[in-house]
C-alpha cells in the first residue's frame, strides 16, 4: 500500500496465537480494529458511545500470505478507499518486520445511531477523515 493514511506498530501477543504458535486467523482483525480506532480518535471522531452510536462492521475479508508468530513485530497500514452516505470502506495490510505483506483485506463499516440505524456521515466527520487533516 503506497502512502497509507495511518500506520501503527504492534507486537503479536501470545494470547493471539493458536496451538501452532501462529496468530489465529480472526485476530488479524483485532489489530486492524485497534489501528482503526487509534486513527479515528486521533481525528476526533467517535468510535462508539451508547447514546451516539458507532461504526459496526458489515463486511470483512482477508487474504493471508505469511504466518505471524508470538512476539513478531508487525505494522498495520490503513487507507479509506470509499466514503459513502453512511458507510466507509477500509483497506488494510499487515506487514512483518521484513516489510513483507502477511495479510491484506478490507472492512466495510456503517455509521449508525444509538439504535443501530444507519445515519449519514456528517460533513464534519468527512472533513476529519480526509488525508492531511
Image: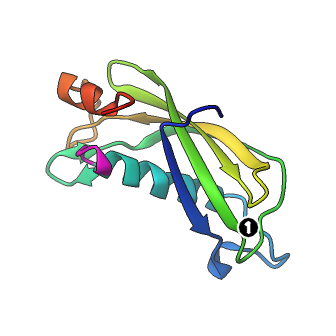
Label 1 residue SS: loop
Quadrant of the frame with the N terminus: top right
Q: Is residue 119 visible?
A: no
Would you name the residue on which mark 1 appears? 23
Is residue 45 within the magenta segment?
yes
Q: Residue at x 62, y 56 (%)?
A: 75
Q: Residue at x 53, y 41 (%)?
A: 78
Q: Residue at x 35, y 27 (%)?
A: 130
Q: Is residue 10 visible?
A: yes
Q: What x and y, as percent, mark residue 60? A: 59, 40
Secondary structure mostly seen in the magenta stretch = loop
Q: Is residue 11 left or right of residue 54?
A: right
Q: Outermost residue, top direction?
A: 85
Residue 10, quarter of picture: bottom right
Q: Is residue 100 left or right of residue 104?
A: right
Q: What x and y, as percent, mark residue 11? A: 62, 71
Q: How is the image coloured?
A: rainbow
Write down the region rendered in magenta: 42-46
- Location of residue 6 with respect to 10 vertically, above or below: above
User: Of 8 and 70, which appears nearest the observer?
Assistant: 8
Is residue 82 within the magenta segment?
no
- Location of residue 72 with respect to 82 vertically, above or below: below
Q: Residues within 10 Å of mark 1 (few under 14, many from 20)?
A: many
Amino acid at each position: 500500500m503506497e502512502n497509507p493514511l495511518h500506520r501503527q506498530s504492534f507486537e503479536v501477543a501470545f494470547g493471539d496465537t493458536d496451538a501452532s504458535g501462529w496468530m489465529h486467523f480472526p485476530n488479524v482483525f483485532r489489530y486492524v480494529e485497534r489501528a482503526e480506532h487509534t486513527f479515528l480518535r486521533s481525528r476526533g471522531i467517535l468510535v462508539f458511545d451508547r447514546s451516539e452510536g458507532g461504526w459496526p462492521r458489515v463486511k470483512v475479508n482477508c487474504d493471508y500470505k505469511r504466518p505471524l508468530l508470538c512476539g513478531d513485530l508487525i505494522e498495520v497500514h490503513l487507507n479509506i478507499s470509499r466514503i459513502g452516505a453512511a458507510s466507509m470502506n477500509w483497506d488494510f495490510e499487515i506487514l512483518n518486520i521484513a516489510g513483507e505483506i502477511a495479510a491484506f483485506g478490507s472492512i466495510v463499516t456503517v455509521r449508525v445511531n444509538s439504535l443501530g440505524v444507519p445515519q449519514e456521515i456528517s460533513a464534519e466527520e468527512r472533513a476529519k477523515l480526509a488525508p492531511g487533516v
